[in-house]
Image (spheres, rainbow, N blue to C red):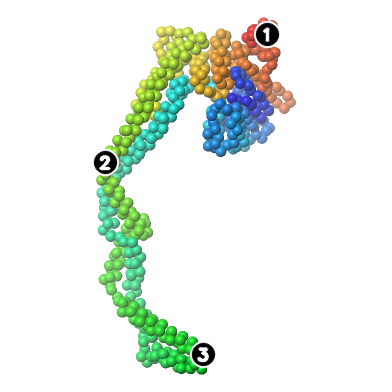
Amino acid sequence: MLLNLHISNYALIEKLDIDISSGFSVITGETGAGKSIVLGALGLLLGQRADSKVIKSGERKCCVEAVFDVRELSMQDFFSDNDIDFDGTECIVRREVTAAGKSRAFINDTPVSLSKLKELSSCLIDIHSQHQNLLMGNEGFLIDTLDVVARNEKLLAQYQAQFKVWEQSRKELEELKRQTEKDKNDEEYLAFQLHLLENAALKTGEQEELEREAEKLAHAEDIKTALYTAFSVLSRDDMDFLSQLRTGGQALSSIASVMSEASALSDRLESVRIELEDIEAEIKRLLDNVEFNPERLAFVEERLSTFYSLQQKHHVTSNEELMRIEEELRERMGRISNNDDFLRRKEEEVGKEFEKIEKIGKELTGERKKAALKIERKLTEKLQVLGMPSVALQMQMEKRAVPDVTGCDKVVFLFSANRNVPLQDVAQIASGGEIARLMLSLKSLISSCRHLPTIVFDEIDTGVSGTIAERMAMVMRDMSQNCQVICITHLPQIAASGKNHFRVYKSEDENGTTSHIVRLSCEERVKEIANMLSGSEVTEAAINNAKSLLKL
């Protein structure tokens, strides 16, 4: 329920701050006084497009803020899921628009996206204007209405959960079919690629080993010459360098008893001699193993060329990556040979999921048909009271060729306001006044089935007057037993039925024109309604008529 509305610097409104009570409230005022401005401001809270042109001339920003009582709406999950402070009783929604055209939204002083603002506000307030009358031709609205009246919340949630499973399985089947077709087209090419990789007999680490061997084979002569030179230095007979080191070490060892330093030097010389002998032997071994082998070099280079060619073809840089591709191709070829089995099993799975949604959908259809009969009966009763004695209605239901997220049903609302006139689609035949009364009756029925948010009716009285207006007021007053109802009206019969009455008016001064809204006292209501009855000149008869309408 809307508790308070604050508007500042919006269009002609400099500052507006009103408290709104429960029950049925009416807003009146002369054409152009600013009633539509109030609706526009509320529209900002519903997430409608923000335009800097709505900011009052000379101001930097405008602000619209509303306080709602949300104790009966069970919205704790929304606040916890979005990490927004919530005391369990009230919710404050605010929208700001700057002169630069930037817009910001807040819920309980927490900045939120526009989508989150819309999500919450749609649960708090419903503005019914003439464009909403088009909903009578909207199948989604009609199906939702059937589900509300049938109280199908749990059954519909069950259906939609199963529909999601079926839809996902169906998408997977389509993807499998697409991939299967592609695999069949690519099978010969894939088999050829796999054949090349298998013939290459790739091994981990082989490429690096062969690259090192190729380097050695390509430089065998240089390597052999360098090794021979080094070996010759160590093994020259004329120097007998190693023998001389041994002799020097023995000489130093012989004086170790009289010169302690000589022992360490002798050991060092012996170590050098042993190291040099080891180096000589290692060089000899390497020298014996090095040979120029053109045939081996050709084999290694050909093998490496095979690796490089395959890597370039598959856009990789190592044999390990090629081996992974080989395994993937092998798996893919195996899958191709089993694709028909995969498809058959997936089709069976999709078929079973479809059977489940059809079963639940059939239950939904049954409940909706019962609800349709109830809606037809209740609306007929209400519309007859609202001046349509010969009205005939039918919510025509047919089975969809393919189920969608709403179920298996196609719904068209058929309508006739006159006797012996065939039923036709309501969107094509009903007048503005008929649609307005039909929507009012329908929302009245919905309000008796579930808790609705605050409902604001704008121009719901289009095309009606007199007794019918009084009856429409009675319907709204009855609705206000279940939810807060606010009606912007030009009709005195409706204005007089409100529990609370607000008047919108304009004033002018040297700074320009400003719109205001005030709550009317009992005496002020008499004057306002008398003015609505008689125009600019309020007569005594109009005063008495106003009192009569107000039951004073």
Residue 134 lies left or right of residue 10; in this view the side is left
Gap between marks 3 and 2, in whole Å?
91 Å
Depicted 499 relative to depicted 196: above or below: above
**Label 2 Cα crowd, 10 Å radius (few <14 / some 14-19 / many 20+):** few
- Up-down relation of residue 89 to residue 396 (above or below): below
Residue wearing tag 3: 260
Furthest-top residue in this view: 541
Name the mark on residue 39.
none
Q: Assign a secondary structure to mark 1.
A: helix
In this rendering, would 159 be left or right of 438?
A: left
Residue at x 27%, y 41% (from the top left corner): 341
Q: Position of residue 80 (x, y in %)?
A: 54, 36
Q: Residues within 10 Å of mark 3 (few under 14, many from 20)?
A: few
> Mark 1 sits on what residue?
543
Residue holding disc 2: 340
Q: Secondary structure at mark 3?
A: helix
Q: Residue at x 32, y 72 (%)?
A: 217
Q: In this orientation, does residue 114 appear?
A: no
Under mark 3, the amino acid is: Ser
Residue 364 at x, y percent in the picture: 39, 24
Asked if residue 247 lies left or right of residue 313, the reply is right
Give the alpha-carbon distance from disc 3 to disc 1, as whole Å: 138 Å
Q: Amino acid at mark 2?
A: Asp
Question: Residue farthest to the front?
Answer: 257
Contact between marks 1 and 2 (CB within 8 A): the answer is no
| Mark pair 1, 2: CA separation | 86 Å
Q: Nearer the viewer, residue 76 or 538?
A: 76
